[in-house]
Image (cartoon, rainbow, N blue to C red):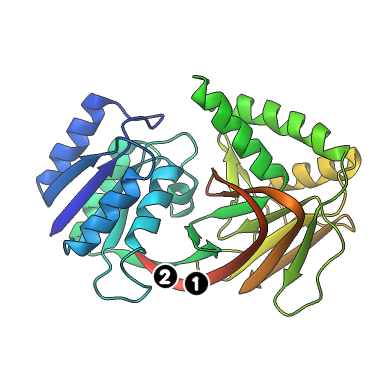
Amino acid sequence: MRAVLVVNPQATSTTASGRDVLAAALASVLKLDVVETQHCGHASEAARDAVRDGADLVIAHGGDGTVNEVVNGMFEVAEPGDPSMPTLGVVPGGSANVFGRALGLPKDPVDATHHLMRALADRSTRQVGLGKADERWFTFNAGVGWDAEVVAEVERQRARGREATPALYARIALACYFRMSRGEPKLTLQIGDDQPSDRLHSVFVSNTDPWTYLGSTPVRMSPETSFDTGLGVFALKKMSVHSVLRHVAEMLRGRGKPHGRNSIQAADVPHLRVACTEPLRLQVDGDCLGERSAIEFCSVPNALRVAV
């Protein structure tokens, strides 16, 4: 089996010696090429080239951003259902690793490599549905509003050398909340052919559940959503302290889905549109894509084959 291992050497939980061990183990059972990413977008380029070169397997070793880049690179040259599309393998190496954890993969890179090798030996794969935000594919979540502001600020802090810890995310989320709570809602949401909503503060879109993790704690925003369904949607009408704290507590408890008059929830959604009264930030899989005035989201069933 021909495989390409795409490694992000800057990922949180990867080391040079660890990468060498993982590559050696995989090379013992695969005809393996290794690409270490050097710049933003390099993982997409490597995955695109792997598809063009007829690879059977593309392995992403890094955080969720690396996985997202690899997936988008693969779809640059192949469509869902295309027999030329390789299988995706994932060896988590970031801080959150939401996609890998949602698939049930071990968080430790060594354990995840052994898990992948067993899956390859057993030919164990599954088809997963993906989401699209305009032209960009996403594996587990996307959002406009509060979460996108948090992601953008975390990226700024990381560029200054700060580690992306749960504490950093929590502090930034709180600061962004207070800033947004003083402003007017700037979003409208249209689910399918329904009428657009009244103005909203934030729209969160899920492709699976948990939506993300706060350290080891899963954040369950849309428990009815999985890789086998359409998208889950959760939107905030207001940013009052009481209602937001109640929603957050419900998400962290993991029992049922957030509810109340202050929010809009929907599950198994094939298509939705978010419009903004002024350009706002969009995030997908924890990466900020800049500002948009309108975004079309859609669910693509059985888009990708993953080794599990």
Q: Percent from the top left, x then y, of residue 154?
A: 59, 31
Around disc 2, counting alpha carbons within 10 Å, would you say few (fewer than 14), some (14 to 19), or many (20 or more)?
Answer: some
Q: Is residue 175 above or below residue 134?
A: above
208 horizontally vs 223: left or right: left
The secondary structure type at the circle numbered 1 is strand
Question: Which quarter of the figure has residue 190?
Answer: bottom right
Quickly name the residue at label 2.
303
The quadrant of the image that shows the C terminus is: bottom left
Question: Which quarter of the figure has residue 235?
Answer: bottom right
Which residue is outermost to the bottom? 193
Quickly name the residue at label 1.
300
Assess whether mark 2 and mark 1 are in contact (beta carbons under 8 angstroms).
yes
Q: Is residue 87 above or below residue 167?
A: below
54 horizontally vs 217: left or right: left
144 horizontally vs 15: left or right: right
Q: Percent from the top left, x then y, of residue 200?
A: 82, 55
Q: Is residue 203 above or below residue 85?
A: above
Q: Residue at x 48, y 57 (%)?
A: 139
Question: Which quarter of the figure has residue 35?
Answer: top left
User: Which amino acid type is marked by label 1?
Assistant: Val
The quadrant of the image that shows the N terminus is: bottom left
Tell me, yes or no, if residue 308 can be seen here: no
User: Which amino acid type is marked by label 2?
Assistant: Ala
Which label sits on residue 254? none
Q: In the depicted view, which residue is nearer to us: 216 or 97?
A: 97
Q: Residue at x 49, y 59 (%)?
A: 136
The secondary structure type at the circle numbered 2 is strand
Q: Residue at x 24, y 26 (%)?
A: 16
Around disc 1, counting alpha carbons within 10 Å, would you say few (fewer than 14), some (14 to 19), or many (20 or more)?
Answer: many
